[in-house]
C-alpha cells in the first residue's frame, strides 16, 4: 500500500514564496504528481517527477528525493489566485499505476 | 471541446434510490477512473478501468458498479443510496505508455446529495 502525508493548511502573503511538502511511502515508485484544485473545481495537473532533483515550470517548481521519500512544491511570487488545495499523488506499484492522493494542503494567500 | 465530461453536475435524491452518473472522454485515453471526494476534500480512488481490466478499491461497497460500454465511456451506477454516499464524484482519464506521464484529466465533478 501507499502512505502519503502533507500538511493540512498553510497561509502565505501575496508576493512571497511558499513550500508545500509531501512525504510518501510506497512499495514501488512510479513517479510523483502534484495537482492544484480550486474550490468547487476539478483537480488540474501541475507537475510530475520521476527522477531526483528540481523541475521548474514558471512560478511553480517541484522537487523529488526518492531516497528520502520526499517531495515539495515551491510556489514563487504568490498571487491571490494561487489560493487552492495542492494534492500530492503517487501511482500504485504492481502494474495498475493508479494514482493515490494525499489529503491535500489548503493554501490561503492573503494580501 | 470538453476533454472529460460527466453528467449530471448536480444530483439530489432520496435514500434508497438508484442513480447513475455518466462520463465520457474524447482524449483517446486508454484508462478511466472514478474518484470520490468527501466533505473533508479527500480524493479516494473507487475504480480504474481500461479495455483489459477493472480494478476495484476493496473498500468500495458493492452497491457501486462501473459500466463501460466502450473505451470512451465509464459510467457509475449506485444502488440503494445512503446518506454517506453524499460527495463529489470525479471521473478522470489518462494514457499510459512510453513517453507519457500518465497524468489524470478530470471531469468537472458530479455533486451527489442524498436526503
Image (cartoon, rainbow, N blue to C red):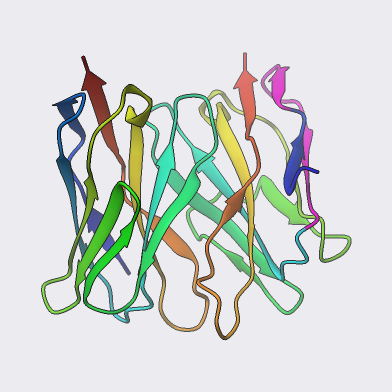
Front residue of A88/A45: it is: A45
**Left or right of B27 on screen, residue B58:** left
Horizontal and vertical percent position of residue B45: 50, 53
Asked if residue A12 lies left or right of residue B23, the reply is left
Queried whether the magenta region covers residue B21, the answer comes back as yes
The magenta stretch is B9-26
Residue drawn at (60%, 53%) of the image: B105
Depth check, front residue: A8 or B79:
A8
Q: Position of residue B30 (x, y in %)?
A: 72, 71
Residue A34 horizontal side relative to residue B55, left or right: left
Taking the spot 17% from the left edge, 70% from the top edge, the residue there is A69
Q: Residue at x 35, y 35 (%)?
A: A85
| Front residue of B96 and B55 | B96
A15 on left or right of A36: left
Q: Quadrant of the N terminus of chain B?
A: top right
* Name of the residue lying farthest toward the right: B69
Count of marks overlaid on the render: 0
In the foreground, A16 or B104: A16
Quadrant position of residue B40: top left
Dividing the picture into quadrants, the one containing residue B51 is bottom right
Q: What is the residue that sits farthest to the left in this orientation?
A: A68
Residue B16 covered by magenta stretch:
yes
- Say above or below: B26 vs A48: above
A95 w.r.t. A104: above or below: below
Residue at image point 22% right, 42% down: A76
Position of the C terminus of chain B, as image quadrant, is top right
Amino acid at each position: 500500500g501507499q502512505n502519503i502525508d502533507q500538511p493540512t493548511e498553510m497561509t502565505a502573503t501575496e508576493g512571497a514564496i511558499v513550500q508545500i511538502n509531501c512525504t510518501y511511502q510506497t512499495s514501488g515508485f512510479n513517479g510523483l504528481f502534484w495537482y492544484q484544485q480550486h474550490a468547487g473545481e476539478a483537480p488540474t495537473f501541475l507537475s510530475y517527477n520521476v527522477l531526483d532533483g528540481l523541475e521548474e515550470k514558471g512560478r511553480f517548481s517541484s522537487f523529488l528525493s526518492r531516497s528520502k521519500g520526499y517531495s515539495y512544491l515551491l510556489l514563487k511570487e504568490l498571487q491571490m489566485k494561487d489560493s487552492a488545495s495542492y494534492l500530492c499523488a503517487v501511482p500504485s506499484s504492481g502494474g495498475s499505476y493508479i494514482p493515490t492522493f494525499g489529503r491535500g494542503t489548503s493554501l490561503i494567500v492573503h494580501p | 471541446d470538453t476533454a472529460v465530461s460527466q453528467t449530471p453536475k448536480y444530483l439530489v435524491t432520496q435514500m434508497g434510490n438508484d442513480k447513475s452518473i455518466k462520463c465520457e472522454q474524447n482524449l483517446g485515453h486508454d484508462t478511466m477512473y472514478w474518484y470520490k471526494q468527501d466533505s473533508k476534500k479527500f480524493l479516494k480512488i473507487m475504480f480504474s478501468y481500461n479495455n483489459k481490466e477493472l480494478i476495484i478499491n476493496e473498500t468500495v461497497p458493492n452497491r457501486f458498479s462501473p459500466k463501460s460500454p466502450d473505451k470512451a465511456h465509464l459510467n457509475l451506477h449506485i444502488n440503494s443510496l445512503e446518506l454517506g454516499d453524499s460527495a463529489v464524484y470525479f471521473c478522470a482519464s489518462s494514457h499510459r505508455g512510453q513517453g507519457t506521464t500518465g497524468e489524470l484529466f478530470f471531469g468537472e465533478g458530479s455533486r451527489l446529495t442524498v436526503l
